[in-house]
């Protein structure tokens, strides 16, 4: 079996084929990209110029205060994690709450301080213990914490044989309904997410990935009924997001493109905004893959669909005005589908702004007529910022991967990007820019000193 994550990294699948030459000049600054947002042909305001996603490096300061321990003799993160794992594996006299507390502490520690060395040293005991907690299904809360710990463990270790060990248990869990409706919803959605991490980061093969996409397609096409989660927006959204995440690692999606496009188009009529947005993003990812294939080979996919009809449906969602949708959801819907429509109409990735600005600065002298309509588009507006690193989000593949990583790591994403090769591989090849010094928060502290905080700015349209 060839590790799918390594295949992605070696092939440069994270970025568009046309943009892969950028990797040669950006070695040592891993990441990946795609962006989108639609705007009228007008001069954009200054506020629009900084519509970035920004992450401050998060430190688990409630557990430990520094990477090496301070002069007062505090335990280092590596030693703390080692002790935590030893304690976690010793569950002989633990109550259910004790186990939940240990899993919580373990998960939060590696969320902020990933250490593959410590985890790999105990991986042969950790994985069976976590799977036993999942299979036991004593409480919904216990299963959820075991799933979160399992995802964090796989994402940090990146072990090449993990998928074969964990996938069958996760799929069985996804198909069971042992709890209340609300608890089943969360467990199934989290199990789907864990399966995608197992495939992408735990040594899953291309064949395993394709089989998983088929399973996800069954969930999407049946509106969740196939796993006893009928018409459940949370579960269907999880399946759509997992499909985009895993599909971003495959070079050839042509064989399943027509079926997938039909399924995603049907989900545009969902009453759940998150389902609609996830379906729209997958449509953009599919059509982007087809466009890249054509640019590279001169051949087109045998993908049958009504292009004009699809664009009309997507455009309608940019103006959706149903009173049954909250103002917040409506804004989110309009913003995302403006991005998707712009992507399809202009052959761009997500977060692309067609709004115009002066290519030169009119404030340095002269008047407007001197510039002869010297305008340029703002272009890609979404960026992931970590300390002094700025990663442009300019491909739907990168957008799908970043979305999945954010949903799992939260404010630990920065620490994993800086210290976890698995995460860096998933974001490898993106256009990456550097500033001379790490950015500072409003109190003048650098990102590295901003403990436990995540600053995000939305995309302006």
Image: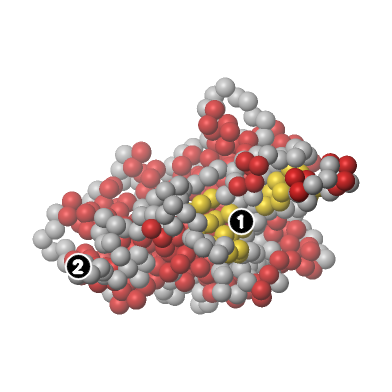
Q: Residue furthest top?
A: 323
396, 375: nearer the viewer? 375
Horizontal and vertical percent position of residue 265: 65, 43
247, 72: nearer the viewer? 72
Q: Neighbour class for label 1 at 10 Å: few (<14), some, many (≥20)?
A: many
Q: CA distance from mark 2 to mark 1?
A: 42 Å
Horizontal and vertical percent position of residue 166: 38, 65
State left or right for residue 170 relative to residue 393: left
Residue at the spot 36% in from the left edge and 39% down from the top edge = 182
State left or right for residue 397 relative to residue 254: left
First in sequence: mark 2 vs mark 1: 2
Residue at the spot 44% in from the left edge and 75% down from the top edge = 160
Numbered badge on residue 72:
2
Residue at the spot 75% in from the left edge and 58% down from the top edge = 291
Read off the residue under disc 1: 393
Q: Secondary structure at mark 2?
A: loop
């Amino acid at each position: 079996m060839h590790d799918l994550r390594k295949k992605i990294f070696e092939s440069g699948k994270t970025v568009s084929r046309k943009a892969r030459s950028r990797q040669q000049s950006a070695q040592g600054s891993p990441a990946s990209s795609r962006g989108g947002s639609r705007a009228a042909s007008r001069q954009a305001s200054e506020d629009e110029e900084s519509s970035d996603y920004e992450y401050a490096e998060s430190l688990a300061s409630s557990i430990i205060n520094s990477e090496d321990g301070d002069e007062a003799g505090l335990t280092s993160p590596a030693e703390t994690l080692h002790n935590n794992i030893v304690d976690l594996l010793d569950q002989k006299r633990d109550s259910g709450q004790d186990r939940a507390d240990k899993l919580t502490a373990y998960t939060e520690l590696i969320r902020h301080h990933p250490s593959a060395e410590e985890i790999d040293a105990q991986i042969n005991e950790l994985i069976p213990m976590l799977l036993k907690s999942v299979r036991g299904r004593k409480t919904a809360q216990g299963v959820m914490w075991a799933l979160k710990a399992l995802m964090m463990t796989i994402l940090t270790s990146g072990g090449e044989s993990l998928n074969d060990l964990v996938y069958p248990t996760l799929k069985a869990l996804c198909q069971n309904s042992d709890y209340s409706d609300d608890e089943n919803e969360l467990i199934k959605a989290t199990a789907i997410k864990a399966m995608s991490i197992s495939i992408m980061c735990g040594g899953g093969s291309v064949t395993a990935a394709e089989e998983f996409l088929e399973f996800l397609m069954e969930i999407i096409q049946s509106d969740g009924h196939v796993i006893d989660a009928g018409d459940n927006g949370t579960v269907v959204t999880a399946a759509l997001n997992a499909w985009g995440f895993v599909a971003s690692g495959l070079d050839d999606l042509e064989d399943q493109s027509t079926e997938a496009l039909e399924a995603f188009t049907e989900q545009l009529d969902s009453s759940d905004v998150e389902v609609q947005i996830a379906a729209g993003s997958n449509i953009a990812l599919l059509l982007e893959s087809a466009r890249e294939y054509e640019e590279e080979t001169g051949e087109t996919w045998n993908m049958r669909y009504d292009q004009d009809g699809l664009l009309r449906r997507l455009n309608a969602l940019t103006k959706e005005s149903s009173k049954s949708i909250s103002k917040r959801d409506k804004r989110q819907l309009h913003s995302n589908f403006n991005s998707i429509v712009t992507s399809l109409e202009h052959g761009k990735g997500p977060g692309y702004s067609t709004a115009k600005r002066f290519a030169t600065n009119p404030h340095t002298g002269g008047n407007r007529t001197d510039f002869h309509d010297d305008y340029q588009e703002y272009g890609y507006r979404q960026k992931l910022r970590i300390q002094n690193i700025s990663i442009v989000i300019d491909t739907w593949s990168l957008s799908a991967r970043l979305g999945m990583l954010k949903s799992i790591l939260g404010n630990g994403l920065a620490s994993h990007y800086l210290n976890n090769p698995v995460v860096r591989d998933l974001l490898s090849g993106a256009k990456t820019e550097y500033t001379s010094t790490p950015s500072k928060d409003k109190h003048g502290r650098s990102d590295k000193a901003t403990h436990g905080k995540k600053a995000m700015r939305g995309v302006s349209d």
